[in-house]
């Protein structure tokens, strides 16, 4: 087991901010978990699990604990019949590797999740979703290491409380299990039926513009990849965490008054939540493309913040506060940050 000391969180996260983690342990196999958590316990230190760090922001003070870096790999079929395939995916795999695996076998269910940065573990933890698909629709359950008992258990999907960017693993509150489990694998069900019904707006528009009429898994995967490449910063080139704010969840009864007050306001049904597009709110507040304390509000998608020249997490906090205040003043909605913080 490889243990490193005082490792820079900025190097482990795509926003490239933050001080040092006291210790860093790379989890390469499930058997590393026992000794790694024993090490943290012996030193009486808190732990934090990181995948690619594509949705985690480091704070300037760093983390006085043990970062467990998830390097678990492997995608194995568990069962297959004519119309469904169940696979067990190690959570250190890239989500895109799962998408490619599914598409290669002409299996459906993950194709619209193409090109989302990050690992399967991160995608499960925050119920990642895009272009009309969501992890909640394909997950059967997870295999998780219980840090309190040292046992590996299976948690079925209906016990994960998955909803918009939310699961039992990232929610606070009296029943919180945050930090208790290390999710080692996701069990995912893929199927033979292509996406039914209306497609997500920008995906439909892309297919129309490019005269694409089929909905094969590969077609949708390639279309989504192209849309994302045009709009989202490449994290190997630009420091960013993708969408920096969540969309605003509203009640169905709010839709008509909002549309009357703000013609053109984009409101979508995502899963079973009605959402106002926060990118539109930020754009309408006049912030698209602006540079605030070294953080650029992307000129392609205003929900995305790019760390162009911020010196610190403090700079990010100042930029964040200004964006939240501007949107609140204009619309009365209070934006919430989407990435977690360590
Ligand atoms: N919009 C604007 N101005 C902008 C950006 C968006 O007016 O600058 C409008 C668009 O015209 C559209 C609506 O807002 O009508 C929605 O925009 P888009 O389809 O680009 O999606 P989004 O709401 O900005 C969400 C997810 C993304 C996901 C896309 C596609 C969140 C926080 N973000 O973004 O997820 O890829 O939908 O499904 O839910 C992420 O979480 O990091 C992420 C990138």
Image: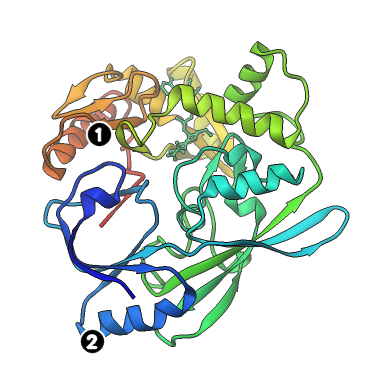
Residue visible at 51% across and 52% down in the picture? 127
Ligand 1 near label 2 (Cβ, under 8 Å)? no
Is 105 above or below relative to 189?
Answer: above
- Camera sees residue 147: no
Given residues 321 and 87, the one toward you in this image is: 87
- Camera sees residue 277: yes
Total numbered badges shown on the rendered structure: 2
The location of residue 245, given as percent across then percent down, is 35, 38
For residue 272, side relative to residue 144 (left or right): right
Residue visible at 51% across and 40% down in the picture? 251
For residue 177, side relative to residue 313 (left or right): right
Task: Locate the C terminus and report the quarter of the image it occupies.
Answer: bottom left
For residue 106, side relative to residue 242 (left or right): right
Structural distance between the alpha carbons of marks 1 and 2: 41 Å
Q: Nearer the viewer, mark 1 or mark 2?
A: 2
**SS label for mark 1:** helix
Residue visible at 70% across and 29% down in the picture? 219
Which residue, as the protein is rendered here, is positioned at the far front? 2
Which residue is disc 2 drawn over? 42
């Amino acid at each position: 087991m490889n243990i490193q000391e005082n490792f820079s969180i900025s190097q482990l996260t795509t926003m490239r901010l933050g001080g040092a983690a006291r210790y860093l342990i790379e989890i390469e196999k499930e058997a590393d978990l026992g000794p790694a958590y024993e090490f943290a316990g012996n030193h009486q230190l808190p732990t934090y699990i990181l995948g690619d760090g594509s949705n985690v922001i480091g704070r300037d003070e760093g983390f006085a604990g043990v970062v467990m870096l998830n390097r678990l790999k492997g995608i194995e079929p568990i069962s297959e019949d004519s119309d469904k395939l169940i696979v067990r995916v190690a959570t250190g795999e890239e989500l895109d590797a799962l998408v490619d695996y599914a598409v290669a076998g002409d299996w459906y269910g993950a194709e619209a999740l193409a090109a989302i940065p990050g690992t399967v573990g991160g995608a499960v933890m925050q119920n990642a979703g895009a272009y009309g698909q969501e992890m909640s629709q394909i997950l059967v359950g997870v295999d998780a290491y219980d840090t309190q008992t040292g046992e590996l258990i299976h948690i079925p999907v209906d016990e994960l409380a998955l909803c918009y960017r939310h699961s039992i693993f990232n929610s606070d509150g009296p029943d919180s299990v945050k930090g208790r489990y290390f999710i080692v694998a996701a069990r995912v069900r893929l199927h033979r039926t292509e996406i039914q019904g209306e497609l997500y707006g920008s995906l439909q528009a892309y297919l129309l513009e490019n005269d694409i009429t089929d909905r094969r898994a590969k077609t949708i995967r390639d279309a989504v990849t192209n849309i994302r490449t045009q709009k989202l910063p490449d994290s190997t080139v630009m420091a960013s965490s993708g969408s920096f704010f969540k969309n605003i969840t509203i009640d169905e009864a709010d839709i008509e008054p909002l549309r009357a007050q703000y013609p053109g306001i984009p409101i979508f049904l995502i899963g079973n939540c009605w959402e106002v597009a926060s990118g539109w709110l930020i754009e309408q507040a006049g912030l698209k493309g602006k540079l605030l304390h070294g953080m650029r509000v992307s000129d392609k998608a205003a929900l995305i913040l790019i760390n162009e020249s911020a010196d610190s997490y403090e700079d990010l906090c100042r930029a964040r506060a200004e964006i939240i205040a501007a949107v609140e003043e204009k619309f009365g909605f209070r934006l919430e940050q989407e990435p977690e913080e360590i």
